[in-house]
Amino acid sequence: MGSSASKAALRATTDEPSEPGPKHLADLIQYINGTNRSVKHLADILSEKTRSSSWVVVFKALITVHHLMVHGNERFIQHLASRNSLFTLYNFLDKSVIEGYTMSTFIRRYSRYLNEKSLAYRLIAYDITKTKRGTDGVMRTMNTKELLDTLAVIQTQFDALLYFNANPDEITNGIIHAAFMLLFKDLLRLFAAYNEGILNLLGKYFDMRKNQCKESLGIYIRFLERTTKLAQFLKVAEQVGIDQNDIPYLNQCLTVVWQTCLGWDWRNGEKSVKRERVMMWGEEIERIWDPEHGASSSGLRAVQTYVSGPHPSSELQGHKLGDLPDGSALLGTSFALA
């Protein structure tokens, strides 16, 4: 590893209470994007920095790693994914300063997310946030088994990201703000893939085996619960000063899936297997439904989902599932990034 890159890594992770310098990050990106450049030593330096007792140094090291995972050559995240363990900061606590107590909490959560991001790469062999989107994209063209497996991985990574769970009054310095910005950008791309996977899942529902139907229902319901948490995360993003043009518009629309399914015209010779799938869906919705409050105790509200994108299509506004051109396209259009 070149001495200039080593110096940049050290300078990006000083104990100065400010985010890693853009110049140092740019130098590191340039280094790992170079042909045949070793990333192991760089990863070792940053890993060593996370063993510091200072919350400032550890947080900056994690931010630097995250930045390189997102913007650097794929070889960097490949190397991280190949390690037996990445960050073991579950018990990290900096008691030396008052701010250290709060920041240590977010360091533990942030490192958990980076561990999950690395593990997701190991499990599916690519970074889901960088895959092609759209009707011919990766998530829309997967077969059923691969789709179910991949959505489970996405949900775990998505949960770890949302678990960061910072309130606006906790994002009090440039370091945690830099981490939040990286998480925000990951969130948009991760949810885009998540959303497209759900669209594909719903489109395949009536052709699945019974056990796959049950699995897909669980995935779909967990997706609905996560859209509520997504909205909360985006609200925080707006409150901490992220430009509204960079925040996707989420139009909350009530969509009771099983009403559409149960409206199927069985008199026109629909196959019994489709009726069985519909009833399975309806029973699962009824199981989680709270008649008094219109929501389950887990926070699922009115079996709701979102039409997403910064500039939603007017033809989708206010439409129910059955009104859409493709009845399986619950989310209407693919989640768009600003």
Image: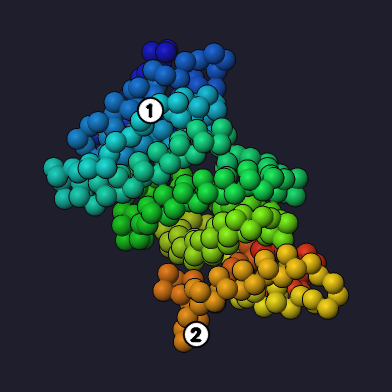
Residue that mark 2 sits on: 291
- The percent position of residue 136, horizontal first and vertical second, equals 75, 45
Label 2, residues with CA under 10 Å away: few <14, some 14-19, many ≥20 = few
Q: Secondary structure at mark 1?
A: loop
Residue type, numbered disc 1: Asn
Q: Residue at x 40, y 21 (%)?
A: 42
Q: Is residue 257 left or right of residue 52?
A: right
- Are circles 2 and 1 on residues that touch, CB within 8 Å? no
Tell me the quadrant of the picture where the N terminus can be found.
top left
- The percent position of residue 16, horizontal first and vertical second, equals 27, 36
Tell me, yes or no, if residue 262 can be seen here.
yes
Compute the Cα span from label 2 to label 1: 48 Å
Q: Nearer the viewer, residue 200 or 242?
A: 200
Residue that mark 1 sits on: 84
- The percent position of residue 37, horizontal first and vertical second, equals 50, 15
Residue type, numbered disc 2: Pro
Identify the residue at the far front of this view. 272
Q: Secondary structure at mark 2?
A: loop
Identify the residue at the far right of this view. 268
Label 1, residues with CA under 10 Å away: few <14, some 14-19, many ≥20 = few
Q: Is residue 316 left or right of residue 31?
A: right
Q: For residue 131, what is the image quadrant?
A: top right
- Does 74 appear above or below 141? above
Q: Is residue 254 left or right of residue 122?
A: right
Q: Residue at x 58, y 52 (%)?
A: 194
Q: Is residue 172 left or right of residue 290?
A: left
- The percent position of residue 14, horizontal first and vertical second, equals 28, 31
